[in-house]
Amino acid sequence: MHPSPPAPDPDPAPDPAVAFAALGSDQRLAVLRALVRAAPDGLTIGALGARAGLAGSTLSHHLGALVRAGLVRQSRRGRETVCAADT
């Protein structure tokens, strides 16, 4: 009988190389800075775009990279999406 494979870690630690790569963009760094300043409540997508000076599609692209890197988390509050630095 073969042993079963270990269960995947439900909350793996972010890969530092991925996190540093995500911060290689000035725009992503501006997004993360705005979220760190807004901690712990975070910002709605609209407020974040205004503070970072980014249009919706550009902001969405950069947020996706930051979320995948484990630096930003998103949650829903009613009809709004709220972003926060994932500390």
Image (cartoon, rainbow, N blue to C red):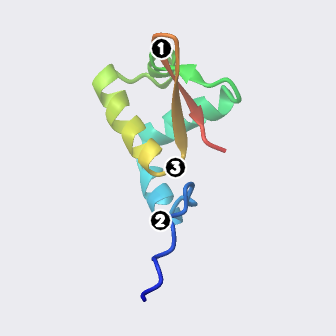
Quadrant of the frame with the C terminus: top right
Under circle 2, the secondary element is: helix
Q: Name the residue: 46% across, 51% down.
A: 69
| Residue on which the image places disc 2 | 17
Q: Residues within 10 Å of mark 2 (few under 14, many from 20)?
A: few
13 displayed left or right of 1: right
Q: CA distance from mark 2 to mark 3?
A: 11 Å
In front here: 47 or 15?
Answer: 15
Quarter residue 35 falls in: top right
The location of residue 14, given as percent across then percent down, is 54, 58
Q: Name the residue: 43% across, 89% down.
A: 1
Q: Are marks 1 and 3 in contact (CB under 8 Å)?
A: no
Q: Are marks 2 and 1 in contact (CB under 8 Å)?
A: no
Q: Earlier in the sequence, mark 1 or mark 3?
A: 3
The location of residue 21, given as percent across then percent down, is 43, 57
Q: CA distance from mark 1 to mark 3?
A: 21 Å
Quarter residue 40 falls in: top right
In front here: 30 or 56?
Answer: 56
**Outermost residue, right side:** 40
| Residue on which the image places disc 1 | 80
| Residue on which the image places disc 3 | 70
The location of residue 80, given as percent across then percent down, is 48, 14
Q: Amino acid at mark 2?
A: Ala
Under circle 3, the secondary element is: loop
Q: Amino acid at mark 1?
A: Glu
